[in-house]
Image (cartoon, helix red, strand yellow):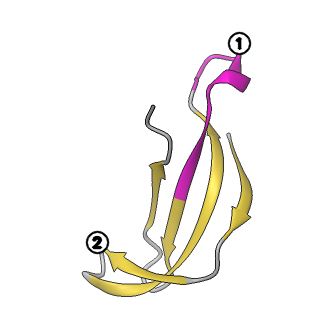
Amino acid sequence: MATQNSAFSETTEICDDCGESTPHDVSIEIQTESKKSENTEFSREPYRVTECLECGETTSKRMNNA
C-alpha cells in the first residue's frame, strides 16, 4: 500500500535504462513494508520514487535506513 504525499517539480537525473541524463518525475511516497495486517502503522516508511519521462523506468529508494 502506497500513498502519495507530495511531488517535486520535474528534475533531470541519470537514467540507468537510457544511459543518459533525462527528465524525471520525482515524488515522495509513504509505503507500508509489513505484509502482516497487525501494526501496519508502525511499518510505514518514506520512499523517493522517480519515473523517467523518456522510457518510463520507475525506481524507488527508501529514504530512512535507520
20 up-or-down from 49: above or below: below
9 up-or-down from 41: above or below: below
The amino acid sitting under disc 1 is Glu
Judging by the rendered image, the residue that carries numbered circle 2 is 16
How far is the residue under mark 1 from the one under mark 2? 37 Å
- Secondary structure, mark 2, is loop
Which residue is painted at 62% across and 26% down in the image?
Answer: 43
Q: Residue furthest top?
A: 38
- Secondary structure, mark 1, is loop
Q: Position of residue 41 (x, y in %)?
A: 73, 25
Q: Does the magenta stretch include residue 57?
A: no
The magenta segment is 34-48
16 up-or-down from 38: above or below: below
Which residue is painted at 62% across and 41% down in the image?
Answer: 31
Which residue is painted at 71% across and 15% down in the image?
Answer: 39
Q: Determine which of the numbered discs, if any, sits on residue 38 in the image.
A: 1
The amino acid sitting under disc 2 is Asp
Q: Does the magenta stretch include residue 39?
A: yes
Q: In which quadrant of the rendered image does the C terminus lie?
A: top left
Q: In which quadrant of the rendered image does the N terminus lie?
A: top right
Displayed quadrant of residue 7: bottom right
Which residue is painted at 62% across and 57% down in the image?
Answer: 28
The disc, 1 or 2, on the residue closer to the chain's N-terminal end is: 2
Displayed quadrant of residue 35: top right
Q: Where is residue 51 in the image (x, y as percent from the top left)?
A: 51, 71
Mark 2 is surrounded, within 10 Å at the Cα level, by few (under 14), some (14 to 19) or many (20 or more) other residues, namely few
Q: Position of residue 13 (x, y in %)?
A: 40, 79
Front-most of 54 and 62? Answer: 62
Front-most of 51 and 61? Answer: 61
Q: Position of residue 53 (x, y in %)?
A: 50, 83
How many discs mark residues in the rendered view? 2
Displayed quadrant of residue 36: top right
